[in-house]
Image (cartoon, coloured by chain):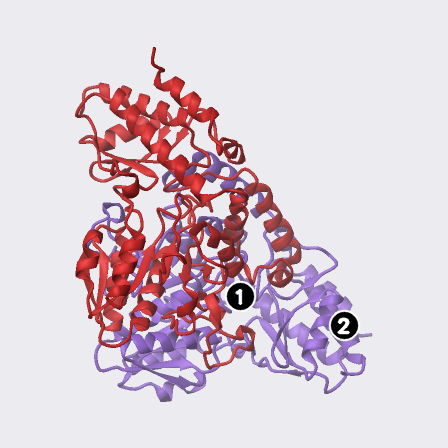
Chain colours: A red, B purple
Amino acid sequence: MSETYEEKAARLDAADGLAAYRAKFALDEETVYLDGNSLGALPAHVPARMAEVITREWGELRIRSWDESGWWTAPERIGDRIAPIVGAAAGQIVVGDSTSVNVFKAVVAGARLAGEGRDEILVDATTFPTDGYIAESAARLTGHRVVPVDPEDIAGAAGSRTALALVNHVDYRTGRLRDLPGTTAALHAAGALAVWDLCHSAGALPVGLDAHGVDLAVGCTYKYLNGGPGSPAYLYVAERHQAAFDSPLPGWNSHADPFAMTPGYRAAEGALRGRVGTPDILSMLALESALDVWDGVRIEDVRAKSLALTDFFLECVRAYVPGGRVTPVTPEAHAERGSQVALACPDAPAVMAELIGRGVVGDLRRPDVLRFGFTPLYVGFADAERAARILAEVLEKPAG
Amino acid sequence: MSETYEEKAARLDAADGLAAYRAKFALDEETVYLDGNSLGALPAHVPARMAEVITREWGELRIRSWDESGWWTAPERIGDRIAPIVGAAAGQIVVGDSTSVNVFKAVVAGARLAGEGRDEILVDATTFPTDGYIAESAARLTGHRVVPVDPEDIAGAAGSRTALALVNHVDYRTGRLRDLPGTTAALHAAGALAVWDLCHSAGALPVGLDAHGVDLAVGCTYKYLNGGPGSPAYLYVAERHQAAFDSPLPGWNSHADPFAMTPGYRAAEGALRGRVGTPDILSMLALESALDVWDGVRIEDVRAKSLALTDFFLECVRAYVPGGRVTPVTPEAHAERGSQVALACPDAPAVMAELIGRGVVGDLRRPDVLRFGFTPLYVGFADAERAARILAEVLEKPAG
């Protein structure tokens, strides 16, 4: 007598070493939240912390909080909190600005680091579009030329004219995980730099920035890091590049002595050279507080659970969903899979609307992709089974 | 029998039509807060609104809030709230990013708007330093050259090679108000664009962006607009320039159809062409909530009270403070005065530390400037008298 998928889910949840983390988040039992790869759930302790930030630090201490509440040093302090999650030693990450702005810093500064004679910027042609738009602008301003390339072909495309490649670690649409170590090594072999966008991998799987010799990286913090809507992004500058890192946005916060307020710019040492203007403290401290849920979490355990969750969800989808109604576009191979499952479905918009109406919250990528994000700190196997079961119910209705 | 300064303060406070606005802010009676030109005080209703944003909009609605809670349209909606305060019609301001990042957008896009053959960017040599640093970077990237100039000399300096001038409306250090209408007209007469930094004037005095034909402007929102620490800045693009506005930071939020996620960039219409990446919602909605205190406020009344406050503070300083201990660097003439009083003082660092210890919170600009900001919505005449009196007590001690 083989077990049902519901029984299997219960067994897997019972054995899940991360199951207790779910209680750290504000979640309701009516909803299966599979959109944490777009906006992470609220860590339950954040509202109290933010009330303190707003009422006490802003409301009572006011200007004194820049020193006394540690506001001024938040960008590098929070960067050091993110660092272990992405495999970076301290002192290489600063938090601030949006991902788009950090892509701009990374591409311009990366092109400058690469030096004269390297006039090509390879850009992941499948990337989240803002990376391509911003890279094009950076190239136009620095006299480079953008060459769109499939990430699988970067090793062959990189050559003596390549300054850098900008690649997404996990494709936002398909959920495909790219070969960060191999691609980085191939770029280095060609004398080029590797710039990685970690939006869809940081907090979902081991990145190993230092171990694999990544040069520059950017990422957002509102997906798997649960920093809140539009929480600040971050920039990683490998220590060996920091002394020559030449930012196109040398705001006063990146000055060696910002309060001297001298007319001449002199860059600070270290990662805080990537700072620009005054940091948005409310968003930043919400992120800092949200990162507390990572205390004691090993990213390897997150990855193991993520793969088990997406495996199990795909298994349930195959078992439950009428044949031919959806086609997985997320790779089967673990080495090529991020932490989401994308299913192509001809009537995806209507299906996702119905799913959300029934409490299964994924999202849509036009025209025909259903996206389901699996955030191992708060999604369980019963959630995966329930999502697949409700998806099957929705798909059993005639398409239209 | 002439009245004392305390009596005069009481009389002026009693006649102050804006006096009731003080109750809208979280302030304590022990402190005279004269640093609202650096970080505005907390509007008292903001904590409850932010608790709702965090707990309900993020915590319960999660991803649905991008539509249902109006997150996605916040940058232009809040821009339209700021517009009347700076004399702009709707549809010309977007909120987002830091002031430094907005200076970069304005200078690069302004240089492009100015067209070929105009290779000089005039920069206010007395400006807040980040403007100069960023303008230098923008000029380097666009093949322009920065010419530092005293704002009083811009009419003479602008010529056929001038693309634009970047000028602070109120000098952050001295509190000197620049001639925005005259300078803008002189730049236009030379065929150049006027780019104004409103950090120290927006919310303190009428700006009249539309009336005076300003081309581009930027400003922060955490000073006189009370948006909170590091709250997002804004960018004004005059309607006549929007169709040709060519942003150096064309992030996906400025795309005509962002959720099409197409590889090719196509700029949105209107002010939202100045958007870049995902807006930092927590900081942005705190700002939106904070702007509620402006309902029913006429900026002309704010200006009248501001001048009366700074006049009265200077009068009390002259009466109370031992001769020669401080030298006002803020102009006497109303037409040249912003909403702060700056006093040069040889031992300014020690004096400001002592003032803060005694509950009079101004700030220091190295090496020797004591800054006192007067925010008419919550500072009264009794505050001004008390600050001058305590300053005199501190200065009566031997310098050193």
> How far from the left and from the top, in percent, is residue A337?
30, 41
In the rendered image, the residue lying farthest to the right is: B1
Which quarter of the rendered picture does the C terminus of chain B lie within? bottom right
Q: CA distance from mark 2 to mark 1?
A: 24 Å
Q: Residue at x 30, y 47 (%)?
A: A170
Q: Amino acid at mark 1?
A: Ala
> In the structure shown, which secondary structural element does the residue marked by tag 2 occupy?
helix
A266 versus B69 height, above or below = below
Residue B204's label in the rendered image is 1
Inspect this view and state whether residue B245 appears. Answer: no
A315 or A97: nearer the eye? A315
Q: Amino acid at mark 2?
A: Arg
Q: Residue at x 27, y 82 (%)?
A: B119
A340 versus B261 height, above or below = above
> In the structure shown, which secondary structural element does the residue marked by tag 1 occupy?
loop
> How far from the left and from the top, in percent, is residue A331?
24, 38
Residue B219's label in the rendered image is none
Q: In which quarter of the view is residue B195 placed?
A: bottom left
Residue B389's label in the rendered image is 2
